[in-house]
């Protein structure tokens, strides 16, 4: 969990791990703690620090001060890396691969902490060799320091370099963004609305809706009398209905 540092310019700190060591002395053991911390502003500046003290809070505070002294500027492009790179430290090596916007940081807890503090939003990673937190952090930092933009490499080599795969990914992602979205104006892109089946009425099997399931729609208030009259009036081709005769009562005989 990242925490905001006091008296700093938008710097955040993430604790990688806390280590405990014990020294056996006359009368018992003497404990000391060490903490490894990553400090960054999520905008291209990151540093790794390590500190030791008799207590955990003091160790973390020392590590934060050490990390602020070792801040590095990282070259990024659109929230991802300009090109794939491999960082090595000791027996640990980490492969960092750029990813399209929306992918996220696919990494373990140690590698993720360094990348997020550096400001990387989309990246694929793979760690080889040692999985020690200290070696992984320094291997990731070694890889981030090797990053260069296409313009910098073209200027150093004095040649023209065509668009890279990362440029194609960023260009393709813009097609899915709303053109009417204005970041400066504070407008947000609206998600598409599903209108499939909206023109159909809901209800039971007979097609009725609401509480009156299966009932026919009632006519408007002003047309009740006319509808009744039309229903009662016979059509021209129909014959008038015969009048119902009264039932005959049986007569008693004089026999």
Image: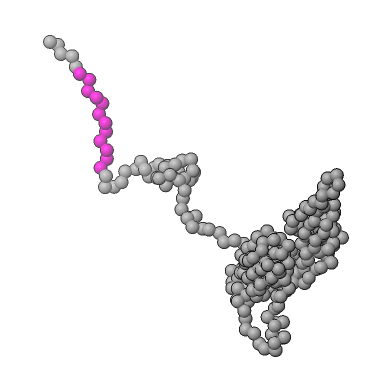
Residue 129: quarter of image: bottom right
Q: Is residue 162 above or below residue 97?
A: below
Query: Which portion, as a residue range, is magenta?
Result: 239-250
Q: Quadrant of the N terminus?
A: bottom right
Residue 221 visible in the shown view: yes
Q: Residue at x 49, y 57 (%)?
A: 196
Residue 243 placement, left or right of 22 = left
Name the outermost residue toward the bottom.
Answer: 158
Q: Residue at 85% x, 52% y: name it.
A: 54
Point 61% across, 69% down: residue:
100
Above/below status of 161 relative to 81: below
* Residue 247 located within the stretch drawn in magenta: yes
Residue at far top of view: 255
Q: Tell which of 254 and 188 is nearer to you.
A: 188
- Total marks shown come to 0
Residue 225 in sight in this render: no
Q: Is residue 164 above or below residue 36?
A: below
Seen at 47% across and 48% down, the residue is 202
Q: Position of residue 41 (x, y in %)?
A: 77, 64
Q: Quadrant of residue 229?
A: top left
Q: Main secondary structure of the magenta part?
A: loop
Front-most of 170 and 75?
75
Examine the structure image and report whether residue 157 is included in the region drawn in magenta. Answer: no
Can you give x and y, in whole percent of width and height, for residue 81 in the image?
A: 67, 72
Of residues 137 and 234, which is closer to you in this image? 137
């Amino acid at each position: 969990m990242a925490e905001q540092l006091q008296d700093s310019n938008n710097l955040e700190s993430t604790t990688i791990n806390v280590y405990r060591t014990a020294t056996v002395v006359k009368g018992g053991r003497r404990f000391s703690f060490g903490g490894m911390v990553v400090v960054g502003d999520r905008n291209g500046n990151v540093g790794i620090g390590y500190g030791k003290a008799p207590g955990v809070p003091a160790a973390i505070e020392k590590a934060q001060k050490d990390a602020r002294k070792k801040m590095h500027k990282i070259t990024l492009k659109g929230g991802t890396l300009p090109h794939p790179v491999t960082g090595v430290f000791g027996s640990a090596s980490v492969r960092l691969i750029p990813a399209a916007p929306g992918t996220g940081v696919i990494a373990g807890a140690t590698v993720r902490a360094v990348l997020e503090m550096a400001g990387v939003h989309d990246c694929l990673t793979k760690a080889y060799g040692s999985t020690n937190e200290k070696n992984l952090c320094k291997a990731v930092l070694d890889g981030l320091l090797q990053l260069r933009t296409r313009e910098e490499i073209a200027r150093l080599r004095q040649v023209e370099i065509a668009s890279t795969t990362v440029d194609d990914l960023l260009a393709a992602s813009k097609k899915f963004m709303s053109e009417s979205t204005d970041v400066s104006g504070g407008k947000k892109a609206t998600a598409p609305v599903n209108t499939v089946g909206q023109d159909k009425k809901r209800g039971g099997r007979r097609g009725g809706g609401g509480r009156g399931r299966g009932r026919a729609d009632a006519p408007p208030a002003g047309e009740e009398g006319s509808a009744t009259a039309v229903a009662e009036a016979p059509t021209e081709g129909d014959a008038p209905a015969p009048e119902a005769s009264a039932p005959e009562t049986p007569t008693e005989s004089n026999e």
